[in-house]
Image (cartoon, rainbow, N blue to C red):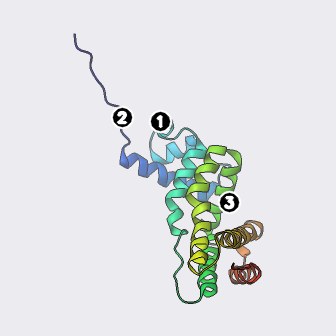
Amino acid sequence: MTAEVTTPRRRSEKSRVAIVGATRDLLLERGFDKLSIEAVAARAGVGKQTIYRWWPSRHALVADVILEDADRILRPIVTTDDVTADVCRWTVTLATALTTSRGHAMLRILTIAGVEHPDTQARLQAGFNTPLRDTVTARLIAAGWTGEAARDASDAIVGGVVYAILSEGRSFQTGRAESIARTVLSGVSAR
């Protein structure tokens, strides 16, 4: 007698797209605190078990959805011969993206999900926070800054803008992002 070998069920791309879309829509409508797997399943037209088969928790699902959208915010710095202008322009673009309705919702959700669940925090750190800082750090190092000075300036710029947006919400004036970047760059020694 031969035992039947069954292959594990694969993700249905149609179901995955429906779940991701439903999660994204519900996050924007209700926020992270009011998002439930039941609501996502109902909106996506799938069973809760389908969601839990692919994502072990609501936090993991949210992290994947947010990271899928992160490329809209994670942009390289356009390089010219003026490093300060390059970083300031990039910082204003970042602030503009994070003060849109969708960008600001994403930032708030990232913060909440990361605080509540350590595994999610690590994934969001690797997929969102670190690339933001690395972008600025790489541009400064390319301009001749030491690694330590570049990392310090990057932390201050990205942290200063993100903290201000979290504190002030969508009323944050994006021109302040340039001011923050200029202040940090002029105050941190390049070498």
Q: Earlier in the sequence, mark 2 or mark 1?
A: 2
Badge 3: few (under 14), some or many (20 or more) residues near its Cα, within 10 Å? some
Label 2 amino acid? Arg
* Inter-mark Cα distance, 2 to 1: 10 Å
Asked if marks 2 and 3 touch (Cβ < 8 Å), the reply is no
Q: Is residue 184 above or below residue 60?
A: below
Asked if marks 2 and 1 touch (Cβ < 8 Å), the reply is yes
Q: Which secondary structure, mark 1?
A: helix
* Dot label at residue 9: 2
Which image quadrant is residue 1 in?
top left
Residue at (31, 30) in percent of width and height: 7
Q: Is residue 133 above or below residue 5?
A: below
Q: Is residue 62 above or below residue 129?
A: above
* Inter-mark Cα distance, 2 to 3: 34 Å
Residue at (57, 51) in percent of width and height: 63
Q: Earlier in the sequence, mark 2 or mark 3?
A: 2
Asked if marks 1 and 3 touch (Cβ < 8 Å), the reply is no
* Dot label at residue 53: 1
* Dot label at residue 16: none
Q: Quadrant of the C terminus?
A: bottom right
